[in-house]
Image (tube, rainbow, N blue to C red):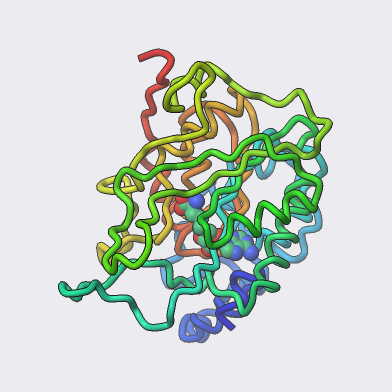
């Protein structure tokens, strides 16, 4: 059932939260009415007060279409595969996707050799798929809808590791996307390699693409590319920066990291500044802790974010209480 979350239905989530379901049953939270599905995760307990935020819109099965203005600068709590179908064609200027990686880590927790401490890997239910086929189907469905909602001049970034990026790249090409670059993110503080049986994995890859080969009028802010890339005149496709750490990392109520793959603000800053203009609309359909929208707003862009897990949506609402002050590297 856990697989159901990643595959795009709420069933797994509700099963995990069965005790909560028993307590509730009201059809509203505060003044707002919700669909039967969402009633089951919210209401009554106070834990779901965040659903009252103006930032959040809860997807409902009875809504067939979303007007752009009602979802601009909103986080939609729902399944991206369902929500995207309700958006009009060709509305967004840029897309950033950080999809599940399908890391396939062993069921047992990994412990560091000698010291014995637990490795904080990605064991989350949203990263579980039963097979490559199921993973590929999810990515294909997601990217098909995303491509439809991209304006003709829009670009798309998809980030991944060696576990998934080659599959994602093939699917993108099969769907007609035209790859402009892959940007290599070199991590200055990668997860240590404790066993020493293979290279330390210190990179992630970002595929940057347009909808098709004929697209020429996309946004590329060369002056930012020059600042962010290492070496060279135009700016090479290598970005060197640390993983998300310290105070930037969102915590849950128990002081543990809220999300295992929260991306650094600096990474999104680079993607957004190089490929969008002020006022552009940026979409992130698998938003996690909402780094994309958070940075987009700070840089005077608009966003639409979709996230299936209420815990993360709650984290996004809290995060937006303290908007970041981002320095524009062109003006410092
Ligand atoms: C790799 S994480 C994104 C992390 C994010 N970039 C950040 O900075 O926090 C992928 C996210 O996709 C979400 N997700 C998985 N399947 C989804 C679906 N069908 N609809 C919406 N979100 C989904 C997961 O809950 C998870 O938070």
Q: Nearer the viewer, residue 25 or 264?
A: 264
Identify the residue shown where x is 42% and y is 53%: 262
* Position of residue 138 in the picture relative to residue 253 (left or right): right
Relative height, residue 20 to residue 294 (above, below) = below
* Position of residue 118 in the picture relative to residue 216 (left or right): left
> What residue occupies the far front of the structure in this picture?
197
Identify the residue shown where x is 61% and y is 27%: 276
Relative height, residue 45 to residue 185 (above, below) = below
Tell me the quarter of the image containing the N terminus: bottom right
Q: Nearer the viewer, residue 88 or 284?
A: 284
* Position of residue 241 in the picture relative to residue 38 (left or right): left
Q: Nearer the viewer, residue 59 or 126?
A: 126
The mark total stands at: 0
Relative height, residue 178 to residue 145 (above, below) = above
> What residue occupies the far left of the structure in this picture?
115
Q: Residue 272's quadrant in the figure?
A: top right
Identify the residue shown where x is 49% and y is 80%: 17
The answer to whether residue 179 is seen in the rendering is yes
Tell me the quarter of the image containing the C terminus: top left
**Image location of residue 240, percent across then percent down:** 38, 36
Q: Nearer the viewer, residue 308 or 27?
A: 308
* Position of residue 262 in the picture relative to residue 196 (left or right): right
Q: Quadrant of ligand 1?
A: bottom right
**Image location of residue 190, percent across then percent down:** 33, 52
Identify the residue shown where x is 77% and y is 53%: 145
The answer to whether residue 33 is seen in the rendering is no
**Image location of residue 251, percent across then percent down:** 31, 58
């Amino acid at each position: 059932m856990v697989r159901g979350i990643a595959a795009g239905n709420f069933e797994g989530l509700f099963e995990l939260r069965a005790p909560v379901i028993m307590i509730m049953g009201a059809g509203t939270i505060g003044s707002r009415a919700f669909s039967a599905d969402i009633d089951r995760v919210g209401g009554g307990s106070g834990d779901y007060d965040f659903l009252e935020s103006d930032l959040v819109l809860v997807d409902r099965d009875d809504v067939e279409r979303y007007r752009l203005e009602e979802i601009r600068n909103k986080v939609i709590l729902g399944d991206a595969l369902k929500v995207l179908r309700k958006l009009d064609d060709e509305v967004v200027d840029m897309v950033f996707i950080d999809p599940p990686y399908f890391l396939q880590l062993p069921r047992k927790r990994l412990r560091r050799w000698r010291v014995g401490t637990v490795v904080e890997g990605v064991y989350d239910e949203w990263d579980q798929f039963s097979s490559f086929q199921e993973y590929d189907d999810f990515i294909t469905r997601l990217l098909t809808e995303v491509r439809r909602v991209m304006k003709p001049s829009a670009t798309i970034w998809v980030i991944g590791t060696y576990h998934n990026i080659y599959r994602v790249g093939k699917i993108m090409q099969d769907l007609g996307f035209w790859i402009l670059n892959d940007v290599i993110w070199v991590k200055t503080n990668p997860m240590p390699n404790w066993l020493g049986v293979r290279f330390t994995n210190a990179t992630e890859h970002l595929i940057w693409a347009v909808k098709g080969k004929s697209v020429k009028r996309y946004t590329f802010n060369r002056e930012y590319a020059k600042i962010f890339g290492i070496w060279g005149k135009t700016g090479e496709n290598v970005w060197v920066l640390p993983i998300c750490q310290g105070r930037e990392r969102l915590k849950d109520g128990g002081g543990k990291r809220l999300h295992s793959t929260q991306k650094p603000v600096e990474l999104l800053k680079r993607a957004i500044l190089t490929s969008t203009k002020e006022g552009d609309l940026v979409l992130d359909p698998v938003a996690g802790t909402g780094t994309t929208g958070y940075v987009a707003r700070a840089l005077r862009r608009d966003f639409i974010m979709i996230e299936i897990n209420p815990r993360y949506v709650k984290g996004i609402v809290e995060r937006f209480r303290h908007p970041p002050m981002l320095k524009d590297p062109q003006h410092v």
